[in-house]
Structure formats: C-alpha cells, structure tokens
Image: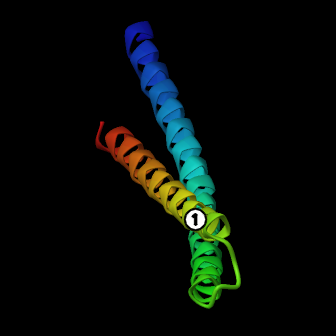
C-alpha cells in the first residue's frame, strides 16, 4: 500500500541520514585525533625547550625573560593538548549519541 511505501521510504531516508551523520562524526574524530597528535608533539618540543632554557638559566646563560618565555610556551602547548583531548572526547560522545538512537 502507499502508506507502507511511505513508511519504508521514510525509514530508508532516516537510515541514510544516520549513516551520513556517523560518517561525518568519524571524519571529525579522525581530524581531532590528528590535532591531538600534533599537540602532543608540541608539548614534547616545548618541554625540551623548557629543560634546555632552565639549564641555561641556572648557569646564567639566558635572561629571566627568556626563561619565562619558554615556560609560557610549555603552558600554551599543554593547554592546546587539553583542548585537543576535550574535542576528541566531545566528538566521540556525539558519535555515541547518534549510534544509540
């Protein structure tokens, strides 16, 4: 009957819409995973810079301002990593909401 066809088409449309939403969320998760990896690398590099600057500062080879600058870069890198982790968790949660519907 026409009514049954309408229901089936509606279900088919809903299924395709959900599949598209899932694919979109997975793509976003892959993007934030890459961001998380980049952020982790930035933290490692900032830690290396901080450790080198601390040693130089302790030996009187760099100014207090230069040393504080490396501390700031390390802090900013850690904030960036935390933001990337938050974004990842948020995208996973969004995907879980779609899958559970």
The N terminus sits in image quarter:
top left
Q: Residue furthest right?
A: 61
Q: Please say if 86 is above or below 44.
A: above
Q: Label 1 belongs to which residue?
A: 68
Which x, y percent locates residue 22? 50, 44
Residue 54 seen in render: yes
Q: Residue at x 64, y 85 (%)?
A: 60
Q: Residue furthest front?
A: 60
The C terminus sits in image quarter:
top left
Q: Please say if 61 is above or below 73.
A: below
Crowding near the residue tagged with mark 1, few <14, some 14–19, many ≥20 C-alpha atoms within 10 Å:
some
Q: Residue at x 63, y 54 (%)?
A: 31
Q: Residue furthest top?
A: 2
Q: Residue at x 67, y 72 (%)?
A: 63
Residue 39 seen in render: no
Which x, y percent locates residue 83? 48, 51
Describe residue 68's horizontal placement relative to residue 10 as left or right: right
Which x, y percent locates residue 12? 49, 29
- Find residue 34 and report its image quarter: bottom right
- Find residue 35 and report its image quarter: bottom right
The one nearer the camera, 13 or 98, is 98
Which x, y percent locates residue 23? 57, 46
The one nearer the camera, 72 or 28, is 72
At mark 1, the secondary structure is helix
Q: Please say if 7 is above or below 12.
A: above
Describe residue 32's horizontal placement relative to residue 56 as left or right: left
- Find residue 97 and report its image quarter: top left
């Amino acid at each position: 009957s026409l009514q049954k066809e309408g229901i089936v088409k509606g279900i088919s449309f809903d299924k395709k819409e959900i599949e598209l939403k899932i694919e979109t969320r997975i793509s976003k998760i892959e993007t934030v995973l890459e961001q998380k990896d980049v952020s982790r690398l930035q933290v490692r590099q900032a830690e290396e810079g901080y450790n080198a600057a601390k040693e130089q500062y302790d030996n009187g080879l760099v100014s207090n301002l230069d040393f504080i600058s490396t501390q700031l870069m390390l802090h900013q890198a850690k904030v960036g990593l935390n933001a990337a982790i938050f974004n990842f968790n948020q995208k996973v949660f969004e995907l879980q909401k779609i899958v559970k519907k």
